Amino acid sequence: MFTPHTPQEIVEMLKVIGVDRIEDLFTSVPEKYRFPKLDIADRLSEMEVLAELNEIASANASTDDFISFLGAGAYDHYIPAAVDMLLQRGEFYTAYTPYQPEVSQGTLQSIFEFQSLMTELTGMDVSNASHYDGATAAAEAVNMAFHIFRGKRKKILVSRAVNPQYRETIRTYMQGQENVQIIGDEEGTDFFDENQTFIEKIDNNTAVVVVQYPDFFGRINDYTKLIESAHEKGALVTFVFNPTALGLLKPPGAFDVDIAVGDGQPLGIPLSYGGPYLGIFTTKEKYIRKLAGRLVGETVDDSGNRAYVLTLTAREQHIRREKSTSNICTNQGLMVLAATIYLSVLGKSGFKQVANLCYQKAHYAADQISRLEGYELAFKETPFFHEFVIKTPKPVNQINLHLQNHWILGGYDLSQDYPELDNHMLIAVTEKISRDDIDEFVMALEEVAHD
Amino acid sequence: MTELTIYELSQQGRTGVQFPEPDVPISALPETFKREEINLPELSEQDVIRHFTNLSKLNYAIDSGFYPLGSCTMKYNPKINEVVSRLPDFANTHPLQPIVSVQGNLYLMYQLQEWLQEISGFHRVCLTPAAGAHGEFVGGLIIKKYHQVNKDPKRVKILIPDSAHGTNPATSSMSGFNVVALPSDERGNVDIEALKAECDDTLAGLMLTNPNTLGLFDENVVEVIQMVHDAGGLVYGDGANLNALLGILRPGDVGFDIMHFNLHKTFSTPHGGGGPGSGPVGVSKALAEFLPSPIVTIIEEGDEDLPPFFGFYNPKHTIGRMKAFYGHFGVHIRAYTYIAMHGPKGLRDIGEKAVLNANYLMTKVKQDYHLPYDRLCMHEFVVEGKWDEIPNIHALDISKRLMDYGFHPPTNYFPLIVHEALMIEPTETESKQTLDAFAKAMASIAKEAREDPTKLTGAPFTTPIGRCDEVKAARDLVLCCYIPEE
C-alpha cells in the first residue's frame, strides 16, 4: 500500500542481491510455517477506510454530545487550537527519540522546556521527560523509593483516597519484588480522617507513603503532619497531584514532599478514551541518579552554541541492563509537547483563569446540588478543588441512566471501587461547563429523586 | 542556529489565550492552601506558534527524509491515521463513560485484538501496555505468575541472548528474575550448546528477539523453543522486529508463548519524538488467563438485527492492571486503520519489501563496510563502522557525517556484540532511488575516511548545531531553563 517499488525495480534489486524471486530471501524461515494465509478482510482504499472509521465512531456518543460531569482521573478541558496545529507538524510527530542531538534540537529543547514548566508547576527540584501516565508514574515513584532504600524497607503505605486504578498499578509493578507489603488502603480504612489513623502506620520499615492532592474524592487535605511523621521515620512521601489544581493550590514542593507525580492529561491532551496521556514525574535533586526515565540537559556544541542533549544516560536500561531499576525506554514525546504548548499559550494568567473557573463552577454546582432534597455533600468539612462527592438518594447507576436521557453524563459511581460508598457520586466540573449546564444538571437530579 | 526558550521570550503581562469571566457566584479560596505565585511564561499566541515552528525546523523526521534507525522501524506514517484518530467521536470520549455509549471504541479495540491475534498466531491479545518496554514487563510478570500458579517458584532464571536490547534484562530484573546472558554462534544464532547447559529446573524462560538485532532470523528457532519448553520454561518473543515477519511467519505458530507488538514500529503509528508508543501483548492459550486487565470482549452475541455488545473482562489469574484505563486508544485507532488498508496481501507485501530493501542496501553497503555476519538478512543488517587501517575513525564519525549528506544516521553502538556497530533498517516504504542515494553517501564517506578524515571527525557541518559536549551536560547538570524570579 505504501511501498513504492515498481515491477522493474524489483527485478533490478533482486539481481543486485543475487536471488531470482522475493520468496528466495526467506529460506532461513522454517518452510512449514512460511507465508501463512491470514484471515483478515481485504484491504480498503483511503476513501473507504475513512468511511468505515466514521461509521465506527458514530456508534459512540462523546462529550460533544453530552454535558459531562465525569472526571475521576481524566478531565474534559478546553484545548486551544494552537496546540493541535503545532502537534501536527511532521517534524515533531514523525521524529523519534532524540538520540542524535545535532538533528533533534526541536524535540530536545521542547522537553527541556517541559521539565522547566513541571518544576515550576510542582515546586520540585527536577522533572524527567515523562512516564506513560499518572498511574505508571505513581508506580515508578514507589519503585524508586523502594530502590533508594535498596529494598530493605519493605512497607509501602498507600492511602485509600488515592485513585483506585493507580493503587492497582502500583501493586502490579511491585509484584516482582520479594516480600513487599503494600498496605493502608484496605476496605474499612477510615479515610475520612486519615491524617490520624494513617500516620500511626508509618514505621522504620516504611519506604514511602503515597497520598493524593487533591485526593480521589477531590478533597484538599492537609498532609503537613503526615509528612513530618514520615520524615521522622526516614520514609519518603509521594504526592499524586492534579496539574490544573496547582494553578490555585500550593505546590507539592511547598510541603517538602520527596516525589510528586501526576497525570498531565488536563494540560491540553484530549480524553481519547483513556490514552495516550502523560505521566509527570518530579523529585528532589538528591534523588536524581535514582530517577527512571529520560532527562534532557543543557550543554554547548563544538562552537560554543547552547545545545540540549539526553543526559545521565548511565542510569538507564541500555547501559545498566539487568542492574537498572526500571526498564522504561522512551517517554510520551508528543504528549510532552502538547502540555508544553498548552502551558505556553495559556501562560501565567490563562492557567490561573482555568484553575479558578474550575474551582468556582464546581463550588456553584456543589452548592446547588446540596440544596436538593435527598442530596448531600459528603466530606463537608474538607475543602475541595474541582471534584466533590455527593450522597445521592438512589443508586448512582440508576441516576446516571436517567441523566443520559437528558444528554448528561453523570458523575462517577464510587460504589464500583468503594463498597462503603454506595449511593455516592464523584462529580467533576471544568471550565467548559456553563452555569446553564449546571442548572440543567441540578434540575435533572431533582427530577430523578422524585421518580 | 538556536532558539530562545519560552522563558526568555516571555514578556510580563502578555497572554496567548483568554477565557470567559466566571458566570457563577464567586466562592472564597481555601486560605491555607492558596498559592502565592506561579511563574509560567507570558507569550502571545503568535509568539508560541513561531517558537514551536522554529523548534520543529531543528528536527530531522521521516517526513523530511530517510531515517534508517535500526530496530526502530521508521516507516512512513500515513496521514489518514492522523485524520481518523482525531474524529471527535473518538477523541472526545471519556474513559469512564457507560459502555453502551462507547460501543464504537470497544468494537475497534476488539477487532484490533482479533487482527493482531491472526497476524501473530497467538490465542489472545491485550491492548493495554503503553510501549514496547511496558509490554515486555507484562511478559516478565506473566512468566513469574505462571510458575507461581504452577507451584514452581524455584524457576528464577531468565536467559537472554547477548545481542538483546537493554530492556530485556532490565525487564527481567523488574519482574524478579536472575538474568543469564546467552552467547551467539558464528552465524548469529543462539548458541545451542550454551542453551543446553542452562536448561535446568530453575529455568523460568527465554527472551528471544527474532529476527534478532543483527537482522538475522534464528535458523534454529524451532529447536531452541522446543529445548526451553522441554525444560519447563516459557519463551518470550520481543516483537521489536515483527515488521520482517508480516505475512511471512506467525511467531505463535513456531511455539512462542508470549510476544509484544510495537504498534509504533510495525503498524506505522507515529513515533512522536519518543512516544506515545503502544505495546500490546499476545499469548498462547495456556497463558490467556494471565493477561493484564481489563480486556475487551463480547458480552452479548449479536444476531441478524443487532451487533454484538462489547464490554470488558478481567482474566482469572491476571497479573493486574498495567496503567490507568485501557491503553493508548488514540494509537489503537491508527494501527486499526493501517491494517484495514493492507489486508492479507498488503501485510505480506510489507514483510517482503522490508526484507527486499534491507538485502538490497546490505549488498551495496558491504562493498565498503565489513559485514560480520554475511548471509541474507531480514529487515535490517549490522555493519562495522570502522576500518583497521584508519583506527581514528569510529561509527560515531560516520553517523555524524551522514547528516551532512541529508540522512538520519543508523542506530550506532548496538548491538553490543558487533564492534562500532551501525545498524541499518531501511523499511519497506523507501524507494530504490533513496536506497541508492544512501548507499552512494556511505561509499563516499568511506572514501573520505581515507582521503580527508577531518570531514568525518569534524562532522556534522551542515546541521543547526555541531557536536555536543555530553560530558559537560552530565557534569554541570542544567535540567531546566533559567526562570527569572518575580
Image: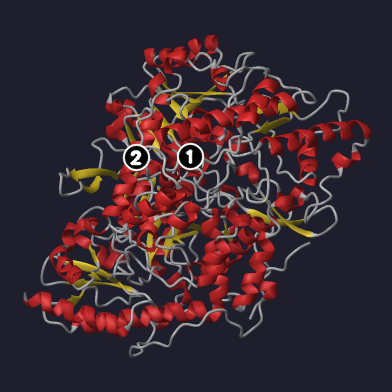
In the figure, B366 relative to B448: above or below? above
The amino acid sitting under disc 2 is: Gln
Among the 4 quarters of the image, the one containing residue B387: top right
Asked if badges 1 and 2 are on one and the same chain, I answer yes
Circle 2: element type: helix
Q: Which mark is residue B462?
A: none
Residue B415 visible somewhere in the drawing: no
Q: Position of residue A64 (x, y in %)?
A: 33, 69
Q: Residue furthest front?
A: A8
Could you tell me which residue is drawn at 45 percent across and 28 percent down? B247
Sequence-earlier tag: 1 or 2: 2
Q: Which residue is mark 2?
A: B113
Q: Which residue is mark 1?
A: B262
Q: Residue furthest right?
A: B451
Could you tell me which residue is drawn at 44 percent across and 71 percent down? A244
Q: How is the image coloured?
A: secondary structure
A318 or B399: nearer the eye? B399
The amino acid sitting under disc 1 is: Asn
